[in-house]
Amino acid sequence: MGLLCVNRSLLVRQILLGKRPITLPEYPIDMGRLKGPTNCFWCERECECLTDDHVIPYSLGGTLEYAVQACPDCQNRLSKAEYEVARKSMLAIHAIASPVAPRHPDRPTSGHLRPSYLMVKHPAGGYGETLLSAGERASLLPYFEIKVMPGEPLEGRVRGTTDEARRLLETFRRGLHNTPGPNRFLFQITVNLDLHEDISSDPQFWPRIVLLPGDRLLVRARNPEEVQRFFHIFMQLATSDYQVPEKWSSDQGTEILGGTQHLMSLRFDPQAVRRVAAKAAYGLFRNLADRSLEQELDLNIRQYILGLTDSIEEPVFIEPDLLNIITSEAPHFIVLSPVHDRKASIVSLYGFRFRVQLGEAGALPEPVLIFCAIDGSGMRRGSTQELYTVTEQIKGLHFLQPWQLIDKPINPDA
Ligand SMILES: [Zn+2]
């Protein structure tokens, strides 16, 4: 993933590739101060502008029943991780398949999946760009694709409806008429070179410019050279008097048949997912148990949840096989201090289970079970019978530290 800045004189000005650097900003967490109603639950700094913070993200179905009070800085840090989880991670598939109601009633959906790519074999040739919106069926996105293989004749295709294709071209042309900013940039286009080798080795894949929701533009190609070749041609097209024809014979439809195989790549920070699990366990613990954790552990876990730690040892343990994705309506649950693992909490989000270590003081006299409906319809305490059933499900689970999985092959039979 990179950013392409379009400039009138120099088309491909800068392509930034690779991972964003990880920085841990100065962000003091106060300890040992008297906590009052004006102290942030996460950093404990005093703030007059605290707001409700869902312990389970709203986008995953969390409600305000067990909310805590957080300052804007912490809200900001946490919501970045929650966005990553709810729109880009493996949990995002579930959040899109079983969405909560949108926050704004006038919006038809509550967001889109943000994969690195989501493509189908286009019935009329090549690879179609696909969009998955919350609660809706997959639909095709509009794009212009141009075959720019050196030594081969140029060929181009336009996908999408006439209106969509015109809108794409207009968005680009409008950008070219922007007043250049101080760095001479006109506008930005995301460049994505992340392609499965089956696609990149297929001559049927042509580089393209895609119109994403919100009138954002994306260029997808095999490599930076192909981006340059594509842009050279597309720029000629965009600055000519070319008009998208009123009608063309093939593929006007944007519906994708059920059962169509999709090629997808999700790129996300897996620690963001673990932080969200830790937040659910710690937030509920502090909310429901009339006690705190040991001071050092308490500080560590809050720093971890806020993304302020780079220690290899994490308070969250994961299951070795987190790859199965089967959507269901089953609720999330959190068991605080389960009988077989008193100093931990087990968090289940869409069936992905996490073990959050809460230490000696995290051992409660009795386990506590909380359910959270995935459609946002509510959170509740589980009954004794439900606690028994859930405990049976989780007591044989095997959890590892995330770093333990890095060098170990995952054995599907284990
Ligand atoms: Zn705070």
Image (cartoon, rainbow, N blue to C red):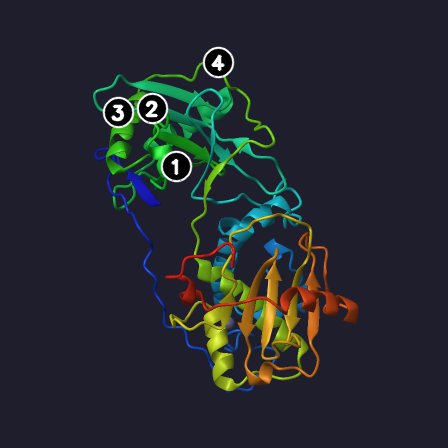
Q: Position of residue 70 (x, y in %)?
A: 56, 70
Q: CA distance from mark 4 to mark 1?
A: 24 Å
Task: Check the image and name the residue furthest to the front.
Answer: 413
First reached walking from the N terminus: tag 4 or tag 1: 1
Name the residue tied to disc 3.
Answer: 149
Q: CA distance from mark 3 to mark 2?
A: 9 Å
Q: Is residue 2 left or right of residue 384?
A: left
As helix, strand or loop, the secondary structure at mark 4 comes to: loop
First reached walking from the N terminus: tag 2 or tag 1: 2
Residue in the image at 49% along x and 12% along y = 249
How packed is label 2: few (under 14 Cα within 10 Å), some, or many (20 or more)?
many
Query: Within 8 Å of ligand 1, the CB of disc 4?
Result: no
Whether residue 177 appears in this view of the structure is no
- Amino acid marked by disc 4: Glu
Q: Are marks 2 and 1 in contact (CB under 8 Å)?
A: no
Q: Are marks 1 and 3 in contact (CB under 8 Å)?
A: no
Whether residue 211 appears in this view of the structure is yes
Task: Return the mark for residue 218.
Answer: 1
How packed is label 1: few (under 14 Cα within 10 Å), some, or many (20 or more)?
many
- Amino acid marked by disc 3: Met
Name the residue tied to disc 2.
Answer: 146
Task: Return the mark for residue 246.
Answer: 4
